Structure formats: structure tokens, C-alpha cells
Image: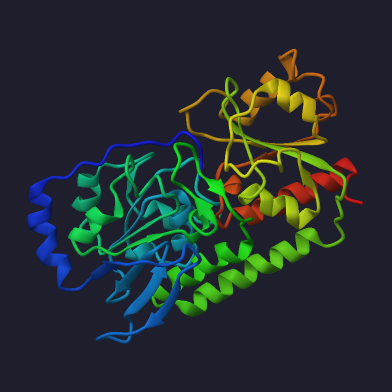
């Protein structure tokens, strides 16, 4: 998950009174034990469009294809928009970047509830019949609201399996990977949402397009022996990628080595002396448009790297081997495929692809 995201849930009785009768008869979500892997969905129940799935430790039942969906994270919103679901969305939130190219018109049709976390009250104002999130923090304690609060109103919630499959989120940071994330988990999220919205064929086509792009980007690239560092944000106490999240997918697809592959933390904060000592060949830099931490944009990061006495003599800085990625490309989303493509292209430009 992206570093530095926090919020405060708010609950108002008038919204419970108004929303519960509207939603409870149509929608049901029951908590139960389960794995954190990608949800497995089945058609079941009173209507042909009902879906039941195991999702990040919860059993979720959606009685009909949603008509008033809210995407609480940009990653979730961009999947829905890519599936052509703008007319069934009533809100989005928590954005780090401009919307994915090609989705601008569709995105403009959907109200943005907040650039970061909206209040629980504001989400309920949309009278949602389905809520989806990309990150555990968004739909947990300290975020918009825990999933249990939506449960009480009969509103089904879906959490991206990329933030729970093989991942421990019990600590205070951004979680720790117990196993490496794979693109198949991202594809599983797409297929889950496509089934929930009863647009399975669209989901299959989107996955096929993404798979084709990865195959094309990685063809002929063998970057074995090339070391890489991923810097998300903050120049004072920088967040660098550990071994096994979305940057790990890019690293593995291209055969590189992450200089911090010895840590399973999602985004550990690492001092610059340690970074300089690891001396990566390539620097992948988050180019964020949010303003919540120091050195968010790529320009700010590069300015720091080239002026700081600890970092300016690093190999990647001297050679200006920078690859600029959006924040969403560094999160486990459909944009991770963009990350594979852009890093592969940069390796070719740098002459490091063989």
C-alpha cells in the first residue's frame, strides 16, 4: 500500500436510519474465516446475477450486479472504469495521480468524494450498494470505516486481494509480505469485479490485453545482474520498496535485483547512507501529484538526489539512470503493467537489457 495514508471514520445515526432499509433487503455480507488469496466467486442465490465470494477473510454475497458502486481507492476506480462501469459508479476517492490515460471522459462522469479519505458520512450520502477498496488502511481502522460498519448497513465490501494475499497488515507500517506478489493476483481482482458486476467477458478481455502488454514489454529483455532501487516518497525518511510487493513484480518480470530484496516490508523507511552503500544501477522514482510528504514529484526527488552529498555520487545518479513511474504503477494495480513497460523501455535505452 502507499505510505502515509490515514483518515478518521465518522458515523451518523440519520444515515443508518435512511440507508439500512434501502439496502438490507437487497444486499448481504456475512463475515467468516477464509484465506487472504484472490476471491473465488460463484453465481448463487435468488437471482442469476447474485455472486458469493471469499475475499480477504470474509464471505461476501452481492445479491445483484451493483448499480451504485463506490471505489474508495484510485486503483479500484481505474479497474471499474476500465471495465466500462462509470454509469454504475456514484463516487471515487483517495487519488495519488491523474486518472489513467484513456479513462478521462469516463472518470469525469463519476463524482470524486475526496482526494484522500472521505468521511463515512459522505460515502453513505451516495447510498451505495457496493464498496470496493484497494488498500487495507482505506477500509479499516483509521481509514474511511472498517468493513464491519458497512456490514451493519448490509453494504457488501470488496478489498483487493493484492493487499491481503500473502501479506501481514497487523503492524503499524504498510505491512509485510510473507510471500511474493504476482500479477495473477491483480488479474484475479479484475475477474472478481467483472463477475460481481456481471461483465465477465469484459474482465477476460482486459486481463488478456494486460497479459499481452507484459509479454511484449519483456520480450528479449534479460537484465540479470542489474540492480534497482524503488523510491516512493519522502526525502527526510524515504520510503523504499521491499522485495515482494508491486515493485517486486517489475523486478522479477525483467530479471533484475532489488537492492533491498532482503526486506519483506512493503515500504520500509531506509536512511540515505544505507541506500548509497547499496549503490543501485537504476533508480525507479515515484512521480506523485499528491502533496502529503516531502519530495513527492520526480523533479523534487531528482533535485534532492543530485544535490545531497550522500546521494550525488551514487552510480544511478551520476549516470542519470532514472525511471519515472506514477504512484499507482508502484502499487499493485493494473498500472503495475505500465511499470513493467516503462522500466523495460528504460533498460533498453540505458543499454542494460542484455
Residue 316: quarter of image = top right
- Residue at 41 percent across and 67 percent down: it is 34
Q: Position of residue 169 (x, y in %)?
A: 46, 47
- Asked if residue 294 is positioned above or below residue 338 in the image, the reply reads above
**53 sits left or right of 98 in the view:** left
- Asked if residue 351 is positioned above or below residue 107 in the image, the reply reads above
- How many marks the image carries: the answer is 0
Figure colour scheme: rainbow
Q: Nearer the viewer, residue 86 or 141?
A: 141
**38 sits left or right of 273 in the view:** left
- Residue at 57 percent across and 69 percent down: it is 206
- Residue at 71 percent across and 43 percent down: it is 261
**128 sits left or right of 217 in the view:** left
**110 sits left or right of 221 in the view:** left
Q: Position of residue 249 (x, y in %)?
A: 67, 54
Q: Position of residue 159 (x, y in %)?
A: 41, 58
Q: Position of residue 259 (x, y in %)?
A: 75, 38
Q: Nearer the viewer, residue 38 or 343?
A: 38
Q: Nearer the viewer, residue 248 or 326?
A: 248
Amino acid at each position: 500500500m502507499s505510505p502515509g495514508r490515514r483518515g478518521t471514520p465518522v458515523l451518523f445515526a440519520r444515515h443508518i436510519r435512511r440507508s439500512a432499509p434501502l439496502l438490507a433487503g437487497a444486499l448481504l455480507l456475512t463475515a467468516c474465516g477464509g484465506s487472504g488469496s484472490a476471491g473465488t466467486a460463484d453465481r448463487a442465490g435468488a437471482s442469476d446475477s447474485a455472486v458469493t465470494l471469499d475475499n480477504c477473510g470474509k464471505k461476501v454475497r452481492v445479491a445483484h450486479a451493483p448499480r451504485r458502486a463506490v471505489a474508495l481507492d484510485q486503483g479500484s476506480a481505474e479497474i471499474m472504469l476500465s471495465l466500462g462501469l462509470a454509469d454504475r459508479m456514484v463516487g471515487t476517492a483517495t487519488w495519488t495521480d491523474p486518472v489513467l490515460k484513456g479513462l478521462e471522459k469516463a472518470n469525469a462522469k463519476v463524482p470524486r468524494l475526496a482526494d484522500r479519505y472521505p468521511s463515512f458520512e459522505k460515502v453513505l450520502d451516495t447510498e451505495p450498494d457496493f464498496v470496493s477498496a484497494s488498500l487495507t488502511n482505506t477500509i479499516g481502522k483509521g481509514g474511511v470505516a472498517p468493513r464491519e460498519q458497512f456490514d451493519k448497513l448490509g453494504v457488501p465490501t470488496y478489498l483487493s486481494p493484492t493487499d491481503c494475499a500473502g501479506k501481514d497488515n497487523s503492524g503499524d507500517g504498510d505491512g509485510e509480505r510473507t510471500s511474493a506478489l504476482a500479477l495473477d493476483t491483480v488479474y484475479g481482482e479484475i475477474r472478481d469485479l467483472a463477475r460481481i458486476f456481471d461483465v465477465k467477458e469484459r474482465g477476460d478481455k482486459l486481463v488478456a490485453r494486460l497479459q499481452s502488454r507484459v509479454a511484449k514489454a519483456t520480450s528479449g529483455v534479460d537484465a540479470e545482474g542489474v540492480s534497482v532501487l524503488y523510491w516512493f516518497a519522502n526525502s527526510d525518511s524515504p520510503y523504499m520498496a521491499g522485495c515482494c510487493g508491486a515493485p517486486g513484480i517489475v523486478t522479477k518480470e525483467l530479471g533484475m535485483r532489488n537492492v533491498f530484496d532482503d526486506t519483506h516490508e512493503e515500504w520500509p523507511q531506509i536512511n540515505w547512507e544505507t541506500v548509497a552503500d547499496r549503490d543501485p544501477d537504476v533508480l525507479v522514482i515515484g512521480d506523485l501529484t499528491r502533496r502529503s510528504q516531502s519530495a513527492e514529484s520526480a523533479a523534487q526527488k531528482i533535485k534532492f538526489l543530485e544535490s545531497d552529498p550522500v546521494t550525488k555520487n551514487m552510480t544511478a545518479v551520476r549516470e542519470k539512470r532514472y525511471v519515472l513511474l506514477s504512484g499507482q504503477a508502484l502499487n499493485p494495480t493494473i498500472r503495475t503493467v505500465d511499470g513493467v513497460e516503462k522500466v523495460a523501455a528504460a533498460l533498453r535505452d540505458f543499454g542494460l537489457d542484455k
